[in-house]
Every structure is written in structure tokens, then in C-alpha cells.
Image (tube, rainbow, N blue to C red):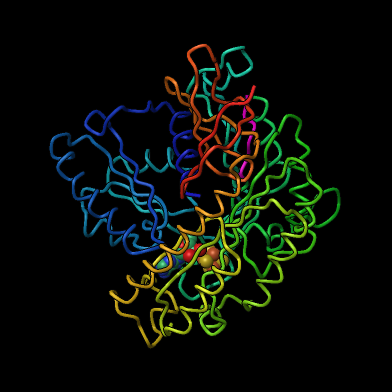
Amino acid sequence: MNIRDTEIIAQTLAESGYIESPSIEKAHLVVLNTCSIRAKAEQKVFSLLGSLRKAKKRNPALKICVAGCVAQQEGQKIIKRMPHVDLVIGTQHIYNLPTLLRQSSKHSNIAINLSDTYEIPRFVPRLSTADAQAGSPAPPLDMQFSRFVTIMQGCNNFCTYCVVPYTRGREVSRNVKDIIEEIRKSVDSGVCEITLLGQNVNSYGQSNSVMTNGLPCSFSMLLRQVAQVDGLKRLRFTTSHPKDLSDELISCFAEIDNLCPQFHLPVQSGSDAVLRRMNRKYTTTDYRRKVEKLLNARQDLALTTDIIVGFPGETEQDFQQTIDLLEDIRYHGSFSFKYSDRPGIKASHLDGKIEEHVKGERLQIFQKRQDEISLERNKEYIGKSLLILVESVNYNKLAGRTATNHIVHAGLSPSQVIRPGEFVNVLITSAGNHSLKADLLP
Ligand code: 5AD
Ligand code: SF4
């Protein structure tokens, strides 16, 4: 979501005349787009702002803007702590950045109001010169073939460990017409893969009653419409909340050809007691049942998840249940984190905080086992012929992605001319924890 927001910031600035600078030293404006999901991400912002103080001393005309979740959360406190910051903008203000910059020319400024009736503006992707040439026989090497498209923002779920409902506000879905227009423009300019983005895409359309063809539009209805955009080869989405994963969406995996067999379904913990305290609103039994249905709909689905270890009150037995779930589901991969106390979240008031070293030990145990399982999972692809979308070509090597979102590396002979954006067939020859190796097939 932050990567996409940063692209939007870059585009709105370019449209008002800014040119991307090759270095901070030469820049007149630095925008930090920030994340506050865990304490570490926030610490990085303040340490970078500290070093920007020196850059501003050398160049007093330099403007510094802090955007994103830390900006939303800390607001005025950022300027108090870092008076060299010129502008602080919250998560719903990225589209207005050029105007806010003009207004902030004389004194420090903050714009962090969050509105429940916020509408995601219409946004048409600007064709870069690279994209505009995509139809030509040899598209440039920096052309983007895969893009993110925001379909909703904010969250109404209030998981007790999470700052997102406070930093991004209530759930707001974008209208279908604007989404399709953005995707169509991207595909017309050569993009072949789209990832739909939202904090909880499964509840798309519900909070602000999005309509399509006179009917309330669910996420699966949107997915079916997007899949039909002419020329779109691959469609993905992230992130899903297990409680809102409908049978209707599961059947999309059996029925939509260009929907990739990949699913990120964050479980967070394998213990029902912990899930209850996290306010996740599902049990491990509900979760396992949904995974079973997904795998029935699409056997080759690659499943990934998010895990938090060391949530307040997590016992050894609770943690063991998370390992048991990993053993049963055998995720292709996962993102796992130590629980991090954040300002304003409910979990920060819970008893039974777990010591850092215990969290660290649990994380290590989980990640070690996940790595072994990922390797075993990846080995299942050896000997298979798969279609990959080439992302980069360097000398005699190429890297691409399978439909299941696995990275594949393959060698190239000097006579083979392959460009990013092409689909090629490969034969998988070996597997690592995080990627596959392959030979090109004729
Ligand atoms: N501490 C640790 N991990 C967290 N996440 C969200 N909030 C926290 C927190 N306070 C993780 C969850 C979520 C992912 C994006 O970040 O696993 O799914
Ligand atoms: Fe955070 Fe839960 Fe919303 Fe995901 S669903 S953004 S974890 S509150």
C-alpha cells in the first residue's frame, strides 16, 4: 500500500512540474512516506529525519515533508521534535500534496484530518515515456509490466494489535468505474499484471455500498469485472481477512483463468485464545475449513500468511499451536513478526507482556521451520514446466515470476534475446528457500 501511495505522490508531483532528483544532496524537496505498523519502522523515520537536519543546514531551501502513517499518528509532535520538517501530511492527503506544499511555503504546516466520508479520488496513471513505447517491438528496460491498483483504503476491524484503523481511518472503497479505468489505461500501456490493493479486500464495497450495474458490488463481482479487461494476463490481490473470505470469492479461483493461484491469508496465530484477544473474529477451525475449500477450488494454490509471535499472554502452548498450524497447512511462505507495542492500540493495555528475548526465541523457531517447509514446498516444483513473466534481464541471466508468485532465475545464452515483460516457459531444475532455478524451454 505504501509503495503504491509513493507512486501516486511521485505522479502528482511530476504533474505539477517536479523532476525526480538523483540524490538527496541535489533535491529541493524530500518526501518521506512512512509506516508505523511496528516500532522499528517508526524508529527508521526519526533516524532518517535526524540525518536530513544536516542536509537542510547545507541547503536551507530544502523542503522536508513527512507523509503516511507516522505522520498521521504523530502529527504536530513531529514538528516539535524535528523543527526542520516543513510539512506533515496524513494518509488521506497524498493526492493534495502539491497544493499543500504551496500553502506551506511560509511556515510549517500539518494536514492530518481523517474523514469517514473520504472518497478515494479518480486517478489515471500517467504514461511514462517508457510505458508509452511498450507497444513497440522493443520496450525499454525500465518499463513496468506489473502494477498495484488501490481499490480501498482504511479498515474497520480493529484487531487489538494494529494501528491501521487509527492511521488510515475507516474503510472506504473506490468506485468500480475509476478502478476499471485505471486498470484499462495501465494495460493499454503494456502492463500485463495487476495486483488489487486494500487492507481488507474481502469486504470491498460493503462500507460505502459500491454499486455496479444497479447491484451492490462485492469483491468477487469486482474481481470478475477486472479479469475481463482486455489484455490483462495476470490478476492478484492482497490482503484478505479470513472472516470475510466468502464462498463466492473461493469459487473465483476455480472459474477465473487469469486470477493467479496465489493467496495471502494472514492467520496471525494458531491459538484460539490468542485470536480471541486479537479480536480476529474467527477460530482456527474456521480458518482451516476455508483453506480446505480454497485448495479444493484450486489445487495448485500457493498459500502465504502473516504471523505475530509473543502477543500479550501468549503461552508456550499457544505458540506450539501456531507451529502445529504451520505443520498442517505447510504455507509456501510467511511474514512473521514479534508483537510490537504501538501507541493507542488495545493490546498495549493487556496484561502478560512477553519478554523480548522470549519473543525473539519464538520468532527464530517459527522462521527456521517455515524456511524448511518453504524449501520442501519449492522442491515440489522441480521437473515442472512453468510460465514466468520476465521481470529483469542482466547479461546472461533473467529473473521472472510464476503465477504462484515464486521468483525464478534462469540462465541465457548469448544468442537468446528476451526482454522484461515477456512470458517464457521454463523447466524448474532446483529450489532454494526463497526462489527457484530453471532452464528456458524452447
Ligand atoms: N506488532 C507486530 N506485528 C504487527 N502486525 C500488525 N501490527 C503489528 C504489531 N503491533 C503485522 C500483522 C499484519 C502485518 C501487516 O503486520 O501480522 O498482518
Ligand atoms: Fe490491521 Fe486487522 Fe485491519 Fe488488517 S484487518 S489492517 S490487521 S486492523
Viewer-proximal residue, 385 or 406? 385
Name the spot of residue 84 as percent of width and height, x first: 21, 48
Q: Tell me which image quadrant ligand 2 sits in.
A: bottom right
Q: Does the magenta stretch include residue 284?
A: no
Residue under the point 58% across and 16% down: 133
Name the spot of residue 243 as percent of width and height, x first: 66, 70
Residue under the point 48% across and 28% down: 15
Residue 201 relative to residue 226: left or right? left
Let me know if residue 393 appears in the view.
yes
Q: Does the magenta stretch include residue 192?
A: yes
Residue 44 relative to residue 321: left or right? left
Q: In which quarter of the image is residue 10?
A: top left
Viewer-proximal residue, 82 or 187? 187
Viewer-proximal residue, 292 or 136? 292
Q: Which quarter of the rendered picture does the C terminus lie within?
A: top right
> Residue farthest to the right?
214
Residue under the point 56% across and 17% down: 139
Figure check: 421 above or below 71:
above
Let me know if residue 163 appears in the view.
no
Q: What stretch is highlighted in magenta?
A: 190-195
Residue 214 relative to residue 47: left or right? right
Name the spot of residue 429 as percent of width and height, x first: 54, 37
Residue under the point 28% across and 62% down: 77
Q: Quadrant of residue 125?
A: top right
Figure check: 147 above or below 140:
below
